Amino acid sequence: MVHWTAEEKHYITSLWSKVNVEEIGGEALARLLIVYPWTQRFFTSFGNLSSASAILHNAKVLAHGKKVLTSFGDAVKNLDHIKQTFAQLSELHSEKLHVDPENFKLLGNILIIVLGIHFPKEFTPSVQAAWQKLVGAVAHALALGYH
């Protein structure tokens, strides 16, 4: 279990309240697919992923990014129960989708970058540290279903 200070919880929930899940989720997933092109193999049904521009404007990528970040919001709401919150998603990604768990870390790091871009004043080193801790905890929880 991750121990959160009151200050860390405040940093996370305060910034989360300003997040546009659709915009930031779509941008984060699109960046993942552009920066780490091997991750595209999990999204073959999404159509044209042939260029950065195609990915950034792909409706299925943007919609799935929103879905991913909406799920991430469950971590924000359940900071003290992240492992339990992501148990089913962990099983799905390991048993059915066979997603390399390293990809969860990559997406978490991309999310940090996107948040920093969108909230430059709010994203102080202390806020970043709290969010790094959160994305690490989520990535770990999602990897627990792997054997």
Image (spheres, rainbow, N blue to C red):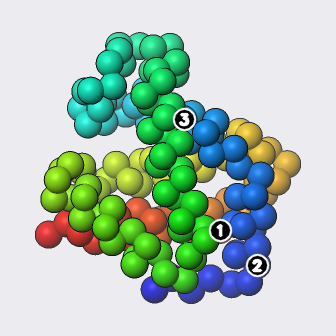
Between 137 and 47, the one lying in front of the other is 47
24 lies left or right of 14: left
Please identify the quarter of the rendering in which residue 126 is found: bottom right
Q: Please report whichever mark, 3 or 2, sits nearer to the chain's N-terminal start.
A: 2
Rendered residue at 51%/31% (across/down): 62
Give, as a three-letter code, the residue at label 1. Answer: Ala
Residue at the disc numbered 2: 7
- Could you tell me residue 59's position as x and y percent? 48, 24
Q: Which residue is mark 1?
A: 130
Residue 100 vs 49, above or below: the answer is below
Query: How many numbered badges does the structure rendering display?
Result: 3
Q: Earlier in the sequence, mark 3 or mark 1?
A: 3
Q: Tell me the residue at 60%/68% (across/down).
A: 76
Residue situated in front as seen by the camera: 138 or 17: 17
Q: Are marks 1 and 2 in contact (CB under 8 Å)?
A: yes
Q: What amino acid is at disc 2?
A: Glu
